[in-house]
C-alpha cells in the first residue's frame, strides 16, 4: 500500500480522491500496489464528504508521518503550496502537483530539491489538464531536438473565442456566459490576460529546451482587445482567432517565446479546437508535427493526470525522474518582436492602405475602418510600414 | 555507454541509426548516458553506408556480446524477427521494436519472456509511427478505465481516401498515386484490406483493456469497396470517409472491436485528419476524450519513437516495465455486429426506401441508385430492415 496525502480539497483535490476511489481496482492492478488516501489537508470542515475521517488541518502531521510517500499538492498559488512542497520534498516524499504557477515560477529549484532528497516532483496535470503532454514531451519525444511548441493552452479563452466566432457574441457577453457555465472564474484576469497560458508555455519550453524560462521573460497578451469586427474580418478570409502560447527555437539556440492571439487558417488542425478544449502541437526534428488534444481543465480530467503521476511514483519510487532542466537566465530568450510572420491589422481613420497587403472586408464597416493581412515581417518592420496610414486599433500575428 | 544492435537496415533501421547519430548530444544528455550503435544486422552489403563498419550478418555475434543491452528489431514479419527477439530476451537484452505484426500476434508471450529474463520489450513505434500513444495510454491514462479507442491507424488508406475526397480521384487512381509517392507498397494488400489497422487496434486494445486481443478475433474491412459515388453522397451530407479501427468496452467487460470504413461528420476532429496523418482518440472515464495526432509512418517519425524507447531502457534498464497484459481468449471479444450505430447504405435497383431514413443525393446518379442514412441499429437489424428494398451495394457505419 502506498499512502497519499492530498493538500487541498477544492475541485481538483476532491476529483483526485474520487478517481482514486472509483478506479481503485484498475489503479492497484496497474501500479502493482494499492494506493490509498491517508490524509487530506483542509482549511474548513467538510462534514458530508465521504473522506471526512481523513481530513487534517496541520501539515506537520503529513510531514511527520513516514508512511506518506506521495503528497498531492492541489492548493494552487506560490505561498503555502511552495512551503509545503519544499517541506514534503525535504522529508523525502515525492510531490505531484497541478499547480502551474508554482512550476512555472519555481520548477527548477523544486526539481533540484527533489533530486537532492531522493524524491520526485511530477506535474503532468499542470499543462493541458488531462491531456498527456509532459510525459510524452520528456520521454516519447526525447530523441528529438524540439524546434517549436504552439498550443491552445487555456480553455476559458478558447471558450470565449468560440462563442464570439460561432455565436456572434461580444467579448463581454461571451465572458459572462463562460462565468455562468463555470468555465471562467469570478476574477477572470489570469485567463483573459493570458497569464495562465504564459505559465503553461513556460513549463513546456523549460522541459523541451532544457533551461528554466520564467513568466516574466514572456511577452504576454490576452484576448480582451478582440472585437466582433476582428472576428468578422478573420472569418471572411478563412481564419479563426486562437490565443496561442508559442516557443520557437532560433538558430542561435535562444527561444522566441510569447503569448498572443493569432489568426489561424481553417485548414490548420488548431483552428478546429473549440470550446474548452486545449491542443498542443510539437515539432521535433525527427518526428515532425505531432498534436495532443483534449479537455484542458476540469475536475476529472485534471485528476486523471494527477493520479497517473501518483501511479508513476508507486512504480518508480526513487531514481532520477525524467523531468529536469538547467537554471534559467537572461540568455535563454530572444526578442519575440524579431520573429517574422504575416500580420492582421485593423486601422481606424485610414485613407489608404500600405502596398502589397491583402484587404479584408466585413458588412457594415464604419467609414475609415480598414483591415488587411500583410506579408511576412518582424514587429519593428510592421510598425514602420504602418506609419502614416491611420490609427492602428489592432495588430496581431497570423500563424504561418 | 549503452550499446545498441539494430536488426535490419531498411527505412526504419537506417532512420534509427541516423537519429541516434544526429541527435547524439541531446540524447546522451537526456538519457544521462551515451547511446551507441555497435552492430547492424544486415542481409546484404551497404558499401556506401556511414555505418558499414558495424554491419554483421550473424545474429549470434549480437546475442553473445554481453555489451549489447538493447536490440532494436525493425526487420518486420513474424519469422526471423520473432526468433531473434526471443533469443535476445533470453540473453537478458531488452528489445525495442516497430513490428506491429509481431506484437499483435505474439505480444503477450514476448512480454512474459522479457519479464522472466529481467529484460524489457518496448514497442512505442508499432502504432502511430512517431505519435506518442503506447506510453501515454499505459502511463498517462493509467488512472482511467478506458471506455473506447477509435483511430485512423493507417496512413496509406488515409492518403487514398483524402485524394478521393479532395481530388475526386477513383480508388484505383488514388492508390496508384500513393504508390508513386512512396506512401503505398508495391503490394498494398495489408494496408488497403485493413490488416495493418487491425494489428494496431489489437495492440492498443490489449494494452488498454488488459487482455491479449488477436487479429483473427477482429472483423476487418478495408477501403476497396468505396467509390466516388460514396464519396459524393457522404460529402452532400457533411461527412467524410475514414478507415477506423475501433475498440469499445461493453457493459459485460467484453470488447466490441473491428476495422471498417466509417462516415465521419466534418465537425469531428477525426474528419480533418488528412493525407498520411494518423489520429487516435481515447475515451477514459476520468479524462474524457483525448486525441493524439501526427505522422503515422515514415523513416524519421518511426525512428523517433524507437529511439525514445531505447532511451527509456537506458534510464530504466531493469524493473517491471510499464507494458503488460493478461493472456487472450475467446471470452474477450463481443460480436461487433451487435454494436448499434447509424448506417450509410447505397442500393442499386431500388424502387423505394425503408421508412425513416435520411436520403442522400449526388449529381448524375444512375436510375435505381439510392443512398441514405438509417437510424441507430445493429448489423442484424440493418439487414432485416433492408430486405426487399433492392440490392445492397454498400452498407457501412456512421461514427456517432
Image (cartoon, coloured by chain):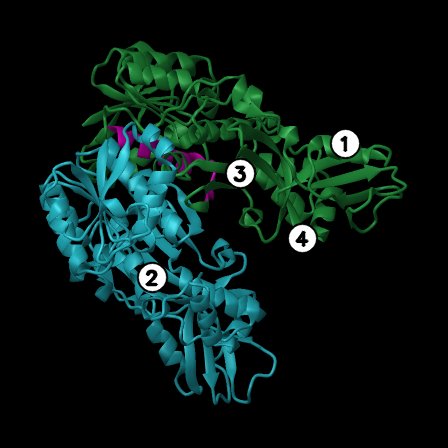
Chain colours: A green, B cyan
Q: Nearer the viewer, mark 2 or mark 1?
A: 1
* Chain to which the residue tagged by mark 1 belongs: A
Q: How far across and down, in percent of the image, does residue A369 sit?
A: 84, 42
Q: Secondary structure at mark 3?
A: strand
Circle 4 residue: A238
Q: Are marks 2 and 4 on the same chain?
A: no
Question: Which label's residue is closer to the chain start, 1 or 4?
Answer: 4
* Chain to which the residue tagged by mark 4 belongs: A
Question: Which label's residue is closer to the chain start, 3 or 4?
Answer: 3
Q: Secondary structure at mark 2?
A: helix
Q: Are marks 1 and 3 on the same chain?
A: yes
| Residue A150 badge | 3
Q: Quadrant of the N terminus of chain A?
A: top left
Q: How far across and down, in percent of the image, does residue A62 sit?
A: 28, 14
Q: Gap between marks 1 and 4, in whole Å? A: 25 Å
| Residue B197 badge | 2
Q: Gap between marks 2 and 4, in whole Å? A: 34 Å
Point out the stretch of residues depicted in magenta: A291-313
Q: Nearer the viewer, mark 1 or mark 3?
A: 1
| Residue A383 badge | 1
Amino acid at each position: 500500500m502506498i499512502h497519499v496525502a492530498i493538500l487541498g480539497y477544492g475541485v481538483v483535490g476532491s476529483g483526485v480522491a474520487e478517481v482514486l476511489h472509483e478506479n481503485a481496482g484498475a489503479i492497484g492492478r496497474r501500479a502493482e500496489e494499492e494506493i490509498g488516501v491517508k490524509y487530506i489537508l483542509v482549511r474548513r470542515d467538510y462534514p458530508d464528504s465521504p473522506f471526512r475521517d481523513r481530513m487534517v488541518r496541520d501539515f506537520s502531521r503529513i510531514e511527520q508521518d513516514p508512511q506518506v510517500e506521495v503528497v498531492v499538492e492541489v492548493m494552487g498559488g506560490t505561498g503555502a503550496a511552495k512551503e509545503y512542497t519544499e517541506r514534503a520534498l525535504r522529508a523525502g516524499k515525492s510531490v505531484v502537483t497541478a499547480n502551474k504557477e508554482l512550476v512555472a515560477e519555481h520548477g527548477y529549484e523544486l526539481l533540484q530539491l527533489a533530486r537532492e532528497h531522493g524524491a520526485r516532483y511530477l506535474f503532468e496535470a499542470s499543462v493541458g489538464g488531462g491531456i498527456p503532454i509532459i510525459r510524452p514531451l520528456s520521454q516519447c519525444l526525447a530523441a528529438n531536438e524540439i524546434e517549436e511548441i504552439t498550443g491552445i493552452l487555456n480553455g476559458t479563452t478558447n471558450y470565449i473565442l468560440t462563442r464570439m466566432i460561432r455565436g456572434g457574441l461580444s467579448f463581454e457577453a461571451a465572458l459572462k456566459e463562460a462565468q455562468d457555465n463555470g468555465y471562467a472564474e469570478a476574477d477572470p484576469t489570469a485567463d483573459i490576460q493570458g497569464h495562465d497560458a504564459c505559465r503553461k508555455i513556460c513549463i513546456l519550453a523549460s522541459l523541451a529546451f532544457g533551461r528554466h524560462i520564467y513568466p516574466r521573460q514572456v511577452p504576454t497578451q490576452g484576448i480582451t482587445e478582440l472585437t466582433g469586427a476582428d472576428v468578422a474580418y478573420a472569418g471572411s478570409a478563412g481564419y479563426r482567432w486562437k490565443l496561442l502560447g508559442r516557443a520557437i527555437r532560433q538558430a542561435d539556440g535562444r527561444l522566441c517565446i510569447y503569448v498572443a492571439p493569432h489568426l489561424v487558417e481553417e485548414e490548420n488542425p488548431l483552428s478546429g479546437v473549440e470550446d474548452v478544449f486545449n491542443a498542443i502541437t510539437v515539432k521535433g526534428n525527427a518526428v515532425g508535427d505531432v498534436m495532443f488534444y483534449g479537455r484542458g481543465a476540469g475536475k476529472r480530467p485534471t485528476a486523471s493526470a494527477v493520479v497517473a503521476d501518483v501511479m508513476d511514483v508507486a512504480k518508480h519510487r526513487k531514481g532520477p525522474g525524467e523531468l529536469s532542466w538547467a537554471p534559467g537566465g537572461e540568455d535563454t530568450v530572444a526578442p519575440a518582436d524579431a520573429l517574422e510572420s504575416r500580420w492582421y491589422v485593423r486601422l481606424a481613420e485610414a485613407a489608404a492602405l500600405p502596398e502589397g497587403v491583402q484587404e479584408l472586408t466585413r458588412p457594415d464597416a464604419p467609414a475609415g475602418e480598414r483591415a488587411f493581412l500583410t506579408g511576412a515581417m518582424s514587429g519593428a518592420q510592421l510598425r514602420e510600414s504602418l506609419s502614416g496610414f491611420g490609427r492602428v486599433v489592432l495588430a496581431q500575428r497570423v500563424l504561418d
